[in-house]
Amino acid sequence: MGDNKLLLEISGMMDNKLKPLNDKINKIQVDMNNGLKKINEILENEIKTDLKLPAENCLSICHTL
């Protein structure tokens, strides 16, 4: 067996061994991205809105002083 053919065989074996690991990493990346999207939605829709009202009240109080 020639060197190139042997290297191709080894490469194919490594690809087969690493495929489950790559699949798990890809799933983790998708899960993390989904989690970050949810966090951003919460920050945008809930927390930002909750902070806006006290800030507006504080400004109106400061303007009356």
Image (tube, grey):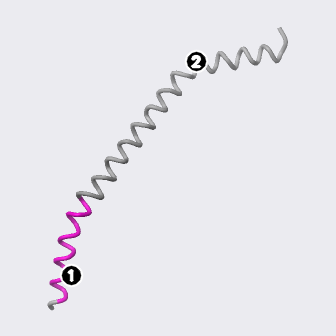
**Is 37 or 3 nearer to us in this picture?**
37
User: What segment is highlighted magenta in the picture?
Assistant: 47-63
Specify few, some or many for label 1: CA neighbours under 10 Å numbering under 14, 14-19, or 20 or more. few
Quarter placement of the N terminus: top right
First in residue order: circle 2 vs circle 1: 2
Q: Which residue is mark 2?
A: 17
Quarter placement of the C terminus: bottom left
27 left or right of 7?
left
Q: Amino acid at mark 2?
A: Lys
The image position of residue 59, as x and y in percent, is 21, 81
Going 34% across and 53% down the picture, which residue do you hit?
A: 40
46 left or right of 30?
left
- Report the magenta stretch's main SS: helix
**Is 45 located above or below residue 3 in the figure?**
below
Task: For the residues labelled 2 and 1, say whether their Cβ atoms are less than 8 Å apart.
Answer: no
Residue 3 among those drawn in magenta: no
Outermost residue, right side:
2
Residue 57 among those drawn in magenta: yes
Going 18% across and 72% down the picture, which residue do you hit?
A: 54
The image position of residue 17, as x and y in percent, is 58, 18
Q: In the picture, residue 45 is in which quadrant?
A: bottom left
Q: Which residue is mark 1?
A: 59
Specify few, some or many for label 2: CA neighbours under 10 Å numbering under 14, 14-19, or 20 or more. few
C-alpha distance separating marks 2 and 1: 62 Å
